[in-house]
Amino acid sequence: MEVFRGRVHFFPFSTQSTYFSIRARASFKVQQENDPFFQAAIERASLRFRESQSPDPLLIDPYVACLLPCNSLEDMDQQLHPYCLATKFIDDKLLETMQSTDGLKQVVLLTDGLDTRPYRLNWPKSTLVFDICPDKVFRGALQKLQDAGAKIPRGCMSFHVPSESFDVENTLCSKGFSGTRPSIWAFQGLPVVNLESFKDILSTVSNLAMKGCLFLGELPVWLAEMDVGDQSAIKKWLDDLFMSYGFRVKMIEYDEVARNLRQDSAKRVSEVSTSILFVAEHLRFSDDQMETWRTEFQRIEEEGDEEGFEEL
């Protein structure tokens, strides 16, 4: 019995197959409706849709409508949500860094499965986009996006890495990621259940990203277990957390992003953010870099031993 994209293939040429398939789709839909992570992903997609439909949008997501249920398209609040500010900031930072960094062709997105960046951003030619996200959400979204005509920019490639993988690092590398080449990482939407799960993410990025690579995104402020208004305490917590994994981090103020983007953006912001926007630089060498240097050092030592033996 094979389960794929919510369909159960049991008796492929009988009416019983159709019966099982319909039940599987209905069951999967109920599971999604009861899944708080999936509902949060839908809410984020709804925010992108509403901003795209505003008279003077900060960002445009041409594919997001196909991912949303019909009833979510009715509320057209024109206020600017902090999530959309963060999304625009991350979009711009990704593209600006890729255009200004020689050899940067690897992008790793840690998302909720409904992220459309692989399709809607104008990636430089030969970019490899790796999307780490929940597999079930991704599979359901992929078909809808393809039906809507979404395509990866010409000359680029996209790879899905299930966030449920037993070994995300090896899975990522098996898809073609290399720790000896520059990369940029963006975290927005990938479900985290506690601080330990985010530490696992930090560990993965630290192991795979070359020295000097950027890791940016937004994480929920509840991970810090502090009052959202205590910015100095949150900043210290963020500094200590990231530095323990070899990152120098800067916390980005949402108001600052709004002012830098457009004068009227700050006036449109609907509420205080419950997330932390950050940009971090990796200060350590990746595991692949260390292994390359160990191999080279060993080779030099062996050549030196051989030359010494010949002299004797």
Image: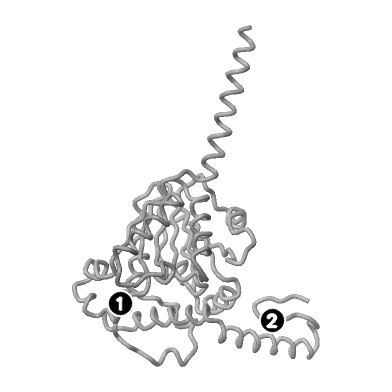
Residue closest to the far left: 263
User: Residue at left 66%, top 87%?
Assistant: 27
Instruction: Pick whichever of labels 1 and 2 is earlier in the sequence.
Output: 2
Q: Which mark is residue 7?
A: 2
| Kind of element beneath mark 2 | strand
As rendered, which of 256 and 127 lies closer to the eye? 256
Report the label total: 2
Residue 18 in picture, x, y percent from top left: 74, 89
- Tell me the kind of residue under disc 1: Val
As rendered, which of 51 and 164 lies closer to the eye? 164
- Tell me the kind of residue under disc 2: Arg
Residue beneath disc 1: 272
User: Residue at left 52%, top 81%?
Assistant: 36
The quadrant in which the N terminus is found is bottom right
132 to 296, vertically: above or below: below
User: Residue at left 58%, top 23%?
Assistant: 301
Image side of residue 102 versus residue 292, left or right:
left
Residue 4 in picture, x, y percent from top left: 68, 76
